[in-house]
Each structure stands twice: as C-alpha cells, then as structure tokens.
Image (tube, rainbow, N blue to C red):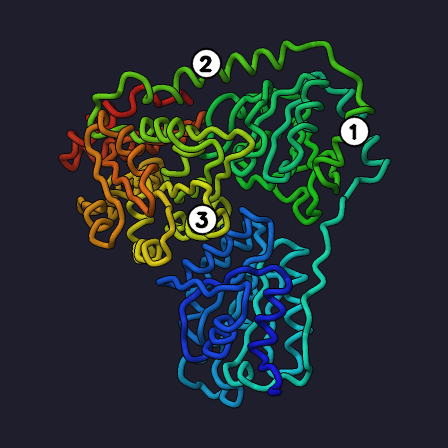
Amino acid sequence: MARQTIAEQLVEILAGTGVRRVYGVVGDSLNPVIDAIRRTGGIDWVQVRNEESGAFAAGAEAQVTGRLAACAGSSGPGSVHLVNGLYDAHRSMAPVLAIAAHIPSGEIGTGYFQETHPDRLFADCSHYSELISNGAQMPQVLRTAIQHAVGLSGVSVVSLPGDVAGQEAPEASAGPAPVATRPVVRPADEEIAALARLVDGARRVTLFCGSGTAGAHDEVMAFAGKVKSPVGHALRGKEWIQYDNPYDVGMSGLLGYGAAYEAMHEADLLILLGTDFPYRAFLPQDVRIVQVDVRPERLGRRSRLDLAVWGDVRETLRALTPQVAEKDDRRFLDRMLRKHAEALEGVVAAYTRGVERHTPIHPEYVASVLDEEAADDAVFTVDTGMCNVWAARYISPNGRRRVIGSFTHGSMANALPQAMGAQLAGGARQVISISGDGGLSMLMGEILSLVQHRLPVKVVLFDNSSLGMVDLEMMVAGLRPHGTGYPRTDYAAIARAAGMHGRRVEDPADLRQALRDAFRHDGPALVDVVTDPNALSIPPHITGEQLTGFALSASKIIVSGGVGRMIQLARSNVRNIPRP
C-alpha cells in the first residue's frame, strides 16, 4: 500500500483537529492539497472568487464557532491576496490556519516565477509563520501552528512548496494536534484586594466593557448592581453586555451614542473590563483607571493606569464582588441613566420616527426596521464605515444574536465574505450581511459564490452612492469631500443576473415587505435600499476643533457653488448635531 503524501497527512491532521472546510482559490502549487481534501471525508474545499474573501470567511467561521478555521492560497499572488483577511482575523483574535503554497523548493531564492517569501510576508499578521522545506518537518510544524492559533487566539501560517506537498510522507500516520481547553486566568489575591480597596474608596464607579466580557454578562451585572455603576461598552463589547442590562449607558467612541462618554468622565473610578479601546481622545485624563484583561500586553497601552489586573473578566469579578461593600447611593447611576434615555430619545431615535415617507430613505430607519424583522438568533456581518454606525446604534443584541465586523482592522468589503463563513458554520441560522455599496462592489464577485454554494445569505445593501464615512472624515478635517462618490448602480439587477433574489427599494413604504420577502426566500437574496447620502454620523461628544473643521468644509462647499449640498446636509442632520 502506498504511503500517504505530505499533503494527505496535512489534511488528515486538519480534519482530526476539527477543521471542517478550507476556503480558497485553486492553483497548481496547491494541487496536492486540493486533491487530498477531495479524497478525505469530513473536510471540504470551499471555492471563493478571491483569496481575501476566503480569509475573511475563515475568520468569521472561527468567531461564530470558537473553533479553528482554515484558508489557503496558491504560490505568489494567490497567497498575497490572503493578507488583508488574515490581518482582520488576527486582530479579531480568531483562530485561523492559513496554508500558503510556495514555488518549487529548489527554486526558492532565485527570483522564480511568482516567487515571494510567505514566511516573511505573514509575520506581522500571525502568531506563527514558518516554511516547511522538508516533508519530515510537516507534522510538527503544523501541530505547532495549530497550537499557536488556538492557544493565542489568532492566525498561524504554514508555507508549503507544491513539490514538498506531493512527496511521500516518511511516517505512516501523523495524528491530530493536541488542542487543549483554554485555561482560567484568575488574578492574584493581592490584586483582587487592591482593586476592592479602590472600589470601596470611590463614590462614582463606571464600568466600560469590551469583547473580553464574553461569557461574563451575569458577573458584570452582579457587580454593577452592588456598586451602583453605570455600564458603557465599546463596539466589540455591545453584543456581550448591552442586553438585559439595567445599568446600560450606551457606547463611547467614534460610533458612540448615549451617556457612556459622560459616565466615564464624571466617575472617580473607571474600570476597563476586557477592552483594548483604541481611542485615547475618548478616555478621561483626570479619573482613576483600572484595567482588567486576560492579555497582559494590553494593560496600560491606551491610558495611564492606577491598577493593572491580569485575569479573565469573569473570574476577576467572581473573586472581587464578594469583597466589595455594597453602595447605597444611586444618584450618579440614576443621573447617567436619565442622560442616556434623553440621548436615545433625541439623537438615536431622531430618524426612525415619522420618516416612513422620507426619500431618500434614512439609513437609520433601514437599520431600525431590519432590527425588528431579523431573527432573534441572527448573525449580522457589518461592513466598515457608515454601516458600522447604523448597526452599532440600531441592531439590538439579546444574548443570542451575533454581530461580526472588521471592528479592529477596519477593512472595507468584509461583510459579504464574512457572511459566507458564518452561514457555512451556522447551518440554518439566519445570516445577514449589512453591506455598503462601496464595500460590496469591492468584492462583489462573492455573490457568485453565494449562488454556487447555495448559501441563503441575505444581503441588505445601504446604497448611498458614496463612501459616506470618508465624506464625513474629510468634512471634520475641514476639507471639501472629493473622490468619495459612486455612480448610481442597480445592484438588485446585478444580483438577479447572478441568479439571486434581488429587490431595489427607493420608497420607505416598501422596505418592510421587501425585507420579509428576502428573508422568506429559500436561497441568497439582496435588498438594495437607496439611502440618503447626506445622513451623517456624529459622535455624542464633539470637540470645538472638529466642529470648526466641519464649518470650514461647509464654507468651502458653499464658496465652490455647492450651497445646495449644504442645504441637503442641514435638512438631513439638523436634529443630530450636538454642541461642543
């Protein structure tokens, strides 16, 4: 009986470790791996139109399942296309293994056709990136790569020349990688005691929560209730902490809303729970700050800390809550809750009431109706830009829904390929891609992948014919927007031509039924909603400098003969411009 090839052993290890599919585009240097996948049960090859999409899909699958996912690229340009999606997976802490096929091993270093150096190329977007130059290395290198991806929550890359992949394996069988269960990290007793003293000595405590609060909802609520603390969140913390939360004061940051900013700045103790919130301008400078995180390299890198606590949020709060004294004074909490309610009634609700006849359609209204019509356990994938804003402000978490996006890497075009991975991982679960026309058009070939694989992804397109977030950024910087517009395009017609259900919506009265029809359709569907290009997203706190920049940009537009545009902006946003 013939021995296994190196490629067959590689696929056997992946399948034995729990990898169910590999996303990518075929190429001759990958042929041995592709053929091994074809002949191995329990693992499938998922063809995409661009390797970048394959990496995005693998990252989304890993985030939905919590398990290792995989993607692959052929030598040279094929593997290079993986880079952006792998950056996103790595920065999202998604365990992904990438197979980067390489040129013939004897040609490495000669400037051969399609030669790159993948082991170097992926070093910055992975925990582990190594070249297999000898078949005997493969089992140990692959197992090590898997352990890095799973244990450190990120990307590992194995570079494999095509000729090495096709060689006979020196060992009869490789066996799966020994993937262990993630350990519990509890802070030392001294740190818990020090944190308890800070909490007991503070009159006004605010909690600000990130993705590290996943699985710690009950513990956060119990602690907040005991110390009468407002609870704000970053974007990646929203899905884990906002639901069933009587202490919720909204979100801070560029996409923020509500009273989170005020609660953080008016506290005398701010506790950052499982967040690597990057925007220093939104963090207070004269408040005592404690940070709790399981990743010690993140402690103190965004702000000055009075105490750094290395540990899981859940285990930290389980140890801390019994040690703190219960507070009786609710005045700070109640004041922040009132501010939050007023903000929701004003800014967040401004465009969702009485706008059923407004055209172009307010994007806030679209998001609000989508939130009402989507399934209670839906997975939403969200494009970077204005779609992030509308999802952050209007999609309601409930403990069962998931919201996935390029929230740390900030890439365009992520939503559609991420929806593919989420759908393949989620089976019958409803998956909705909240796409912008800029992002969708960048990787639009993947609508063909939806049709090919019969994936019932529902694409809700916010079609404003512009890069709206860049438009806003230019205006805040005092610049006249330029290079941000797109020609009007009927994406529903494109979807129908590709074999999908497609519907274009220009009248808000048609929106709800269009969504219902798409959600009922047995297969992929796209609802192209023409939205107001002048709808702005302005944070709940805006500086005088930013407002000055916006006014300067407005004056430039008017001087250039664009007064009509400024009238449109004013009409669209007069209720949503805060005072500095």
Relative to 146, 455 lies left or right: left
**Image quarter (top left, top right, bottom left or bottom right) of the N terminus:** bottom right
**Image quarter (top left, top right, bottom left or bottom right) of the C terminus:** top left
The amino acid type, in three-letter code, at marker 3 is: Gln
Q: Is residue 28 positioned above or below 411 on the image? A: below
Q: Position of residue 81 (x, y in %)?
A: 41, 65
Secondary structure beneath dot 1 equals helix
Looking at this view, name the residue that lies furthest to the right: 189
**Nearest-to-viewer mark from 2 and 3:** 3
Q: Residues within 10 Å of mark 3 (few under 14, many from 20)?
A: many
Q: Position of residue 579 (x, y in %)?
A: 40, 20
Q: Position of residue 156 (x, y in %)?
A: 59, 63
Question: What residue sits right under mark 1 in the picture?
Answer: 320
The amino acid type, in three-letter code, at marker 2 is: Glu
Task: Look at the image and tell me whether residue 478 can be seen.
Answer: no
Question: What residue sits right under mark 2 in the picture?
Answer: 342
Instruction: Examine the image and state in which quarter residue 328 appears.
Output: top right
